[in-house]
Image (cartoon, rainbow, N blue to C red):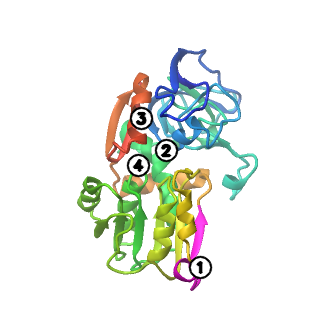
Amino acid sequence: MKAMVLSQTAPLSERPDPLQCVEMATPEPAENELLIQVAACGVCHTELDEIEGRLTPPRLPVVLGHEVVGRVVECGANVTRFASGDRVGVGWIHHSSGTADENLSPQFAATGCDVNGGYAQFMTVPEDYAVAIPNSLSDTQAAPLMCAGAIGYRALRLTGLRDGEPLGLMGFGGSGHLVLPTAKHLYPNSPVYVFTRDESVQQFACQLAADWAGGVDAVPPEPLQAIIDTTPAWKPVVESMKKLRPGGRLVINAIRKEDADKDELLKLSYHEHLWMEREIKSVANLTHRDIAEFLPLAAEIPLRPEVTLYPLDQANEALRNLRRGQIKGANVLAVS
C-alpha cells in the first residue's frame, strides 16, 4: 500500500517535506480488529506537533493521521459489531482502557502517533474504537469531525456553559469552525464571539453566525463565561483570561503549545487575569464516547465542514499551508 511516512522530527522551516511517500505492506487485522481502506483523512495541527518534535511519536518511522474515514475490507476472527463494506471512522483514540476516563489512562494509544494512522491506503483499529459514519455525511465531510469536531464537542462540554451565557472561541480553524454551529445548536440563546488575527477568517466566522468577531486582543461586547482556545500560542491564553467574567473558565483545546511567544506569560497578572475564581482547564485526548455521541449530533445539526482537498501524495503541501495559516476550515487528504 501507499503511505506518507514520518521518519525524523525537525521544524517544518528546516524540513518542508517531512513525509515521504513509500510502499508498505498492507497490515493484517488481529482477532478483534478491522482492516479499513482509507477514503479520507483530515490534517490536524497535532501532526505539526509530531513533525516538529513537541509531541514525539514513541517510534519512527510512523504513519500520521487521526481523522480517518473509510470502509471495512476485512474483519478479525472475533469481530461482531461490523462487517465488510461498513463505513467507519477512527479518531485520535486508537485504543485504551475502555473506562469512563480512558482519555487519561496510561493505556491510551493515539492513532497516527503510538500506532500507524490514516495517511495511508489501509490501517487497522480495534472494533471497539471504530465508529459508524452517518449516511448523511460524505467521507470528506466526516473526516474533520473525527478529531477537530469531536474534541471541540468535548471542550464545549468542559466549559460547563449554560444556555444564555456568552462563549468565546479563541482561534477559528479546523476545530473552531465546527464548535461554533455546535454551540449554536446546543445553546441557542448563548452569543458566540470569535477571536482570530486574520480579518478574512473573522468574516468567515460571521458568515457562520458568530455574533461578533475581532482580533486576539480585541475587547468583546461583554465579559465571557467561557472561552475555548484552540491556538498553538500563549498570548491567547493571557488575553482569554482578561476577557472572562468572575467565575469564568478557559478551556485550552491543544495537545501542545509552541514556545515562540512563551514570554507572553510574563504579562499574566494575578489580580487582572486569575482572581475572582477564574479558572483554566485543559482538554486531554478524546474518549470513544465523545466521538460516538458527537457524530449523530453532527448529522442532526447538520454540520458540513468547510474543507480543502489534497491527494494523499500532497500531504506535505497540506501541512505547509496549515503551518502558514493558509486554511479556512479544514484540510483533508482524499486517499481513495
Label 3 to label 2: alpha-carbon separation: 11 Å
Q: Is residue 256 above or below residue 319?
A: below
Residue neighbourhood size for the residue with mark 3, other residues' Cα within 10 Å, grouped as few (<14), some (14–19), many (≥20): some
Q: Is residue 268 visible?
A: yes
Give, as a single range, the part of the protein colored magenta. 271-282
Name the kind of residue labelled 3 in the image: Arg
| Residue at 70% from the left image edge and 27% from the top image edge | 30
Question: Circle 1 sits in a helix, a strand or a loop, which is it?
Answer: helix
Amino acid type, residue under disc 2 in the picture: His
Disc 2 secondary structure class: helix
Residue 224 lies left or right of residue 79; in this view the side is left
> To which residue does mark 4 refer?
174
Q: CA distance from mark 1 to mark 4?
A: 32 Å
Under mark 4, the amino acid is: Gly
Sequence-wise first label, 1 or 2:
2
Residue under the image location 56 percent in, 42 percent down: 49
**Which residue is label 2 attached to?**
45
The answer to the question of whether label 2 and label 4 lie on touching residues, with beta carbons closer than 8 A, is: yes
In this rendering, position of residue 74 left or right of residue 172: right
Q: CA distance from mark 1 to mark 3?
A: 38 Å
Task: Give the residue pinned by disc 1.
Answer: 270
Membership of 276 in magenta stretch: yes
Indicate which disc, 4 or 3, sits on the residue closer to the N terminus: 4
Q: Nearer the viewer, mark 1 or mark 4?
A: 1
**Which quadrant: the C terminus?**
top left
Can residue 1 be seen from the camera position used here? Answer: no
Q: CA distance from mark 2 to mark 4?
A: 9 Å
